[in-house]
Amino acid sequence: MESIFALLHVVMAIINFSSTNGTLCSLRGEPVYPQLSKEGDIIFGGIFPFHSRWEITDLSYMIKPPSVKCLSLDFRAFQFSQSLIYAIEEINNSSSLLPGVSLGYKIYDTCSSTAMGVRMAMALINGNEDSILNEPCTKPAQVQGIIGETYSSVSMAIAMSIGPFSIPVISHYATCECLSDKRKYPSFLRTVPSDYYQSRALAEIVKHFGWTWVGAIRRDDDYGNSGMAAFTEAAEQLGICLEYSLPFFRTYSQEKVLRMIQQIKSSTSRVIVGFLDTWDLEILVHVFFEHNVTGYQWVGTEAWIFDPELAALDKYNVLQGAIGLAIPKTTVTGLKDFILNIHPLKSAGSAIFTEFWEALFKCKYALQNDTENLPVCTGKEKLSDVENTFTDMSLMPIFSNVYKAVYAVAHTLHNLLDCTQTCATKKQPDPPTFLEHMKMVRFKIKDGEEVYFDKNGDPAAKYEIINWQTSKEHQHEFVTVGLYDSSFSAHNRLAVNMVSIVWAQNSNQVPVSVCSESCPPGTRKAVQKGKPICCFDCIPCAEGEISNMTDSIKCEQCYEDFWSNPHRDECIKKEIEFLSYEETMGILLTAVSITGAFMTIIIGIIFFRYKNTPIVRANNSELSFLLLFSLALCFLCSLTFIGRPSEWSCVLRHTVFGITFVLCISCVLGKTIVVLMAFRATLPGSNVMKWFGPPQQRLSVLAFTLIQVLICALWLTTSPPFPFKNLKRYKEKIILECQLGSAVGFWAVLGYIGLLALLCFVLAFLARKLPDNFNEAKFITFSMLIFCAVWITFIPAYVSSPGKFTVAVEIFAILASSFGLLFCIFLPKCYIIIMKPEKNTKKQIMGKLPVN
């Protein structure tokens, strides 16, 4: 309704202007007059809400609307007015600033109404209270600049209305971020920080205390809606969620307020961010107490957080422990005394002064129709006898903002009027030129504080963090517990003294307000479906992933050589696995290997000692010693498979194994052929032994072995084995193994050994029934049977064994086959040599020849 009235007023003004063809002006409607005024060479305008509300009338639009009747006098506006008057009087008495120029002022009452604010602004720039019929419209504006208004909504209407005229509007208390938009409000400036910074500061405070799940109540106007939008945006960037954001205005119906109360009570958040003003909370604290909405932690804006009048009304401690932002405390020398000296108000405006005096001292000059039983005003009442909002100086930072606004206009005038000893002219500067210079003005007030405007017409943002506390005398106190300075780096802007804070319900513990408890290290947050990001489940990190901080949104993958610990909060070096000499399996295999080599040496010693006995001579002692030597090497070569793989050990283990085993099998094959040839040689007329005598036997062993040497050489020159970290077999550990390099080379080595073993087995099998008392071919057959069984079993076991067990299987195959050859071929002979020497004769060895 108010905005419609303002629009109609502007439309009527345009119609009035167009009816004069743009050359003459005539006043339409009733003139309006300032509440406080003083003449001067250059006039300053002031717009303040001397009344906090107005009488609502029925606007039928059928008749001319009645004049607005303002109600409920607000002492704060008088304090602001006194600050403006003090600054102007100080400048007029100054010899250094605007010498020879007298400043005057006209201060109007907006009744906190947008429509009234626009109307008063138009009166200031047009001077329509003294308009003369047919006065030319080309006259300059009546005021150089307008100080005010207090509230953002009214300031927006004023700034938008007079913006095209380039008359600067400097507000001391309108904080809405929207007013920084120079496209919509080109002539608006302010000496109070924008809600852009306040909203972000509030979000950082909320984050600092760990509150990620909060509710919000905003004033349902431009100030509240814009401020809350900025807060919401900043909060989301910091990971804070709003459970609800409820609008409120003092004209809301009871039903609407009850719905709001119900939503707050049904919520789980314990922190409420209030983008409200004092008047809103004066209503809400009573409603909240009636419906038991208490114990919440309030976070407030500078609009109400350090208002002592509100604190006095909060008898039920609904807002106890509230924390919020306030304009930093400042002192303008002499301003307090001037405000409390009410004589300047009397001389500047007698009409408003009477109403002010009656409200200040709670008395009446005229007692007609007096229903309040108030005493009669004598005019001699003393301000020292009363204690109310007017005598309270807690808003001194805001009074200082009014003071700075006046001085900003004065310093700009001083620069433009070319003032040195005296000002060159008293002529009012052109508004566009004045506005551009004012945006660039930079000066210091008498107490040393520097004043300037940024590109958006805003000052630097500095706040004190205020905490509501109750003294021992049960009096409210506003305790400064921190600072916020937007000019500092992001990490240093906020400083809070946690020890000095008293929380809601006089608790010393920081309230907890989260949708979900924090996820500890080792887990990550997983947002619950259909809920805000602050409501989440804590999911343990998968194997190989970690999160080493609280509330991690994802788990980080460990590097290749690392693995997650059991708590999933640290990457630790993967366990390295290889068959080592220190572990039980390695020790056992080493012991067996050395034992086998030792037994082979013992048997070799026995054979050497009894080398001239028939059983040793009959079985080709030269091949036997060579076989024993190769078996000792076979036992010892298994040791190359134990220990940390290196380049030399990987090459050595496979080549030594392949060559020694071929040497061993070649000897066995030679012995088998000797047995067969020896039997053929016993037949009448046979001369076969001359073709396979000792030289041929040595040559055959050498030839068979050289073939394996050639295979190994080709393998090593094309793609040799090399040490390799196997990261795929197990995720949690690294297997150090020897990569074969060329699989063809490896299987060629094994295949050649298998071919010789198979050939040896076949020949030995053919010779197994030769009619000797001691037929060596039988034992060779058994040994080859064991050898082939071991290596045929080895292949699937080798392929399927994991990690170090692959190596263990290979060592087992080497040892088992070596022991098979050693025991089957040599133990029976040792038994006869040691235990049955009577059988170690030529007659016993040769036996009887078969009968034809």
Image (tube, rainbow, N blue to C red):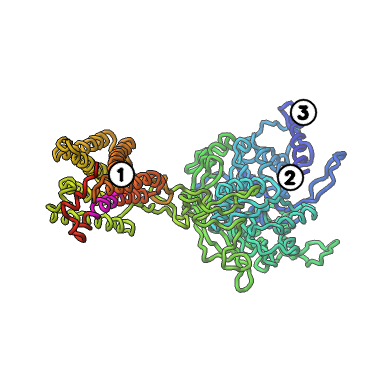
Quadrant of image for the C terminus: top left
Nearer to me, 842 or 598: 842
User: What amino acid is labelled 2 in the image?
Assistant: Met
Q: CA distance from mark 1 to mark 3?
A: 100 Å
Q: In the rendered image, is residue 116 in sight?
A: yes
Q: Which mark is residue 471?
A: none
- Where residue 606 appears, as percent x and y from the top left, is 16, 56
Mark 3 or mark 2, which is nearer to you? Answer: 2
User: What amino acid is labelled 1 in the image?
Assistant: Pro
Region rendered in magenta: 817-828
- Count of number-bearing discs: 3
Q: Which mark is residue 723?
A: 1
Disc 3 + disc 2, Cβ < 8 Å: no
Nearer to me, 92 or 721: 721
Report crowding for label 3: few under 14, some 14 to 19, many 20 or more residues within 10 A (C-alpha). Answer: few
Disc 2 + disc 1, Cβ < 8 Å: no
Residue 272 shown left or right of residue 753 in the figure: right
**Residue 840 magenta:** no
198 vs 761: above or below: below
Q: Earlier in the sequence, mark 3 or mark 2?
A: 3
Residue 476 shown left or right of residue 450 in the figure: right
| Residue that numbered label 2 is attached to | 116
Q: Earlier in the sequence, mark 2 or mark 1?
A: 2
User: What amino acid is labelled 3 in the image?
Assistant: Ser
- Where residue 126 appears, as percent x and y from the top left, is 69, 38
| Residue that numbered label 3 is attached to | 19
Q: Residue furthest front?
A: 852
Report crowding for label 2: few under 14, some 14 to 19, many 20 or more residues within 10 A (C-alpha). Answer: many
Quadrant of image for the N terminus: top right
Image point (21%, 57%), residue name: 832
- Where residue 224 appears, as percent x and y from the top left, is 66, 49
Mark 1 or mark 3, which is nearer to you? Answer: 1
